Amino acid sequence: MWRRNQNTVAFAPSATLGPVAHTVLVALMIAVLGLIYLTQVTKTSTYGYQLDNLETQRSELLAERQDLENENARLQALERVKNSSVAASMTKPASTEYANN
């Protein structure tokens, strides 16, 4: 007597695997998953090294930029003093004497 939605034929596999074959297959799957994990970790650490190098380069460039801005301000300040109306109205001294030791 058959009931509704019941299989009428039972599947019987022709080849069966023993416990040793199952153990080998599980070990192979674990090894493959381990290798995938290692490649992902290595890729992540490589990106970390690249990021560290870029951050170091950025900080060096920012320091160089700050030095150049300071030098620019110093040079512009000297030009402003030379070209100012106060400097133009000054007279040169008649004589200068320096103290000697």
Image (spheres, rainbow, N blue to C red):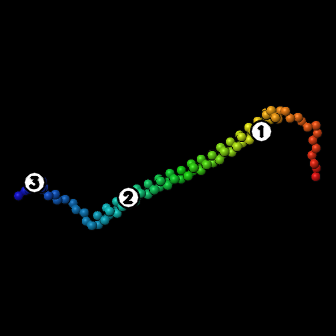
Looking at the rendered structure, the kind of residue marked 3 is Arg
Q: Give the class, few, some or many, for how many residues have Cα within 10 Å of label 2's Cα (few <14, many ≥20).
A: few
N-term mark: 1 or 3:
3
Looking at the rendered structure, the kind of residue marked 2 is Leu
Please give the residue where the numbered disc 3 appears in the rendered image. 4
Q: Residue at x 27, y 67 (%)?
A: 19
- Locate residue 33, reporting x and y percent: 38, 58
- Locate residue 11, reporting x and y percent: 16, 57
Please give the residue where the numbered disc 1 appears in the rendered image. 78
Please give the residue where the numbered disc 2 appears in the rendered image. 33
Q: Nearer the viewer, mark 2 or mark 1?
A: 1
Q: Could you tell me which quadrant the N terminus lies in?
A: bottom left
Looking at the rendered structure, the kind of residue marked 1 is Leu
Q: Nearer the viewer, mark 1 or mark 3?
A: 1
Q: Nearer the viewer, residue 76 or 28?
A: 76
**SS of the residue under disc 2:** helix
Taking the image as drawn, is residue 50 in sight? no
92 to the left or right of 80: right
N-term mark: 2 or 1:
2
- Locate residue 22, reporting x and y percent: 29, 64
Q: Residue at x 94, y 37 (%)?
A: 94
- Locate residue 10, reporting x and y percent: 14, 58
